[in-house]
Image (cartoon, rainbow, N blue to C red):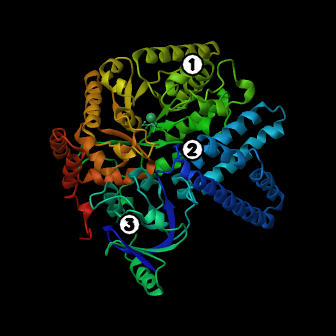
Amino acid sequence: MRRLKGIGVSPGVVAGRAVVLIQRAHVLRYQIPPARVDHELQRLDDSRGRSRGQLVEIQAQLSERRPELSSLFDAQLLMLDDPMLLPRAAEIVREQRVNAEWAVQQVFHEFSAVFDEVADLYLRERKGDVGDLVGRLRMNLRQGLSTPRDLLRELDEASVLIADELTPSIAAQVDWTKVRGFATDAGSRTYHTAILARSLDVPAVVGLHNASELVQAGQLIVIDGTSSEVILDPTPDELERAAHHADDHRPAASVEAYRRRPASTADGVPIRLDANIEFPDDLAAARYAGAEGIGLYRSEFLVTSGVEDIRDEDRQYEIYRGMLEGMAPGSVTVRTFDVDEEQLASRLSPHAFTAGWEPDEARASRQGLRGLRLSLTRPDLFRIQLRALLRAARHGSLRILFPFVSSVEQIREARAMIVTAAADLARRGEQVPRVPIGVMIEIPAAAYTADLLAREVDFFTIGTNDLIQYCLAVDRADERVSRLYQPLHPAILRMILMVRRAASRQRIPVSLCGEMASDPAQLTLLVGLGLTEFSMTPGAIPVAKQVLAELRSDELRALARRILKLATIDEIEQALLAALGRLTLTKGVAS
Ligand code: PEP
Ligand code: MG
């Protein structure tokens, strides 16, 4: 048994098997000193050993239940010994002196290039096996830790969540009827997620510094939010105590009551809460959470999931139509594909490549050719998507949203494409209704020219996820600077206010769909800045309704005015959380 002392931010005692979540685990590239090369090679070797063990186990399980499928993993086991794979990754580590994760990723690209050249369809499809195996190797390089989405999908009963940090939007994706409590390395008593924990009635301890390193996935853990402790491998007595307390907690009960209510502040200002979704199937979750509509459908998941043929106009039409009918009378805002070159190219079969379109590894980047910019370079694909959308528009309330816009010229070009797509349909004898066209404000240049852009479009959607990273020059995937990724930076607040004012002057609606909206504390500040429309991950909607219902809009405006005069993020956070500390939500905080 081992006890870790942290800060109890939500009372109660619970026990469960640990699910470990490392949010900052990305494929990073970093240089290693010569003395570390052997260590990286050892990590590669360990990852191979773990992967082999897992594959053999999967095969054994399958041979009992689905014997016909177990041979599928023979290929992956053979690949583990292929000199082109791990020995090649080791060579990259030695020669380029880079970390093992990056080397494995490079090998995957090399493999992919070879497979794409192969004419034999069977062999080409083996690329999927390599991708699967590389994913496993990478996962094992992170010592068995998976991505947030994977982990959250695989939760079984009686889990507790141990994370390096837990953003409100990730917290919102957790099924709190299965996860009994959480503990994080980061955080303080005023940590934003703490507010969420208390409103959900989930015991939580934060500020543990290195719990996510010490706790092994699957380890039995007690989280005691009342005495601010996390107990690893608890004694039977400790487990008994947790079981005794468990009856006191009916997670999420208070929030549940808010699902069906329309959102408004305590003084009756209506607030529109839409849902962000990635897959058409998420519609059910959006409706269940009480979303008014879909404020952001990230249609690019049609591209990246690899399931759909994005050149099939009829198939896209069916998907969009299904969403519009499923959400009626609520509106659905479909964002056109926001992918980069590499993502798009990897989803188009080799015969679709046209001259000059092969992905250029050196240039492929989330900063460059992406979103609307990329769509405009592929009018063939863009026109298919626009035609499918315009056809679907007859079946509900559709809005089309263009991502990653940085100039008026791009909007005009995109509008011209819409006219062309509508003309295609008119020639086919199809009626096209008028569809509102909007842009994401997610590049600082767009925020600074919001007054000019507002004259060209019907609505704005502020994408704070990208806006923050480009405004503050912080690549969120680079953990060395991710601490500088600060939504409450005065520059971000001023930009949001500027965009909101530009939209008001032009009398066009503006919503905000970045992660900021999922954070109850930041949401209230955004309402204070005058925003009244938001789109967020569905799970965050009931909590947002509850928080808003307890606050008066005039007080929030006064709070925002005070906060806009503050110079540092610390001061801003303190002012915000002090104001929210008066909420009844914060009941029963352990002191
Ligand atoms: C954003 O940038 O804030 C946004 C919502 O878009 P995405 O997260 O999909 O880039
Ligand atoms: Mg974005």
N-terminal of the two: label 2 or label 3?
2
Residue 438 visible in the picture: yes
Could you say which quadrant of the image residue 272 lies in? top left
Q: Amino acid at mark 3?
A: Val
Front-lying residue, 511 or 349: 349
Classify the position of the C terminus by image quarter: bottom left
N-terminal of the two: label 1 or label 2?
2
For mark 2, what is the residue? 98
Ligand 2 falls in quadrant: top left
Which numbered tag is attached to residue 377? 1
Cβ(mark 3) to ligand 1 < 8 Å? no
Element carrying mark 2: loop
For mark 3, what is the residue? 202
Residue 339 in the image, given as x and y percentages of width and height: 55, 32
Element carrying mark 3: loop
Badge 3: how crowded within 10 Å, few (<14), some, or many (20+)? many
Front position among marks 1 and 3: 1
Q: Amino acid at mark 1?
A: Thr
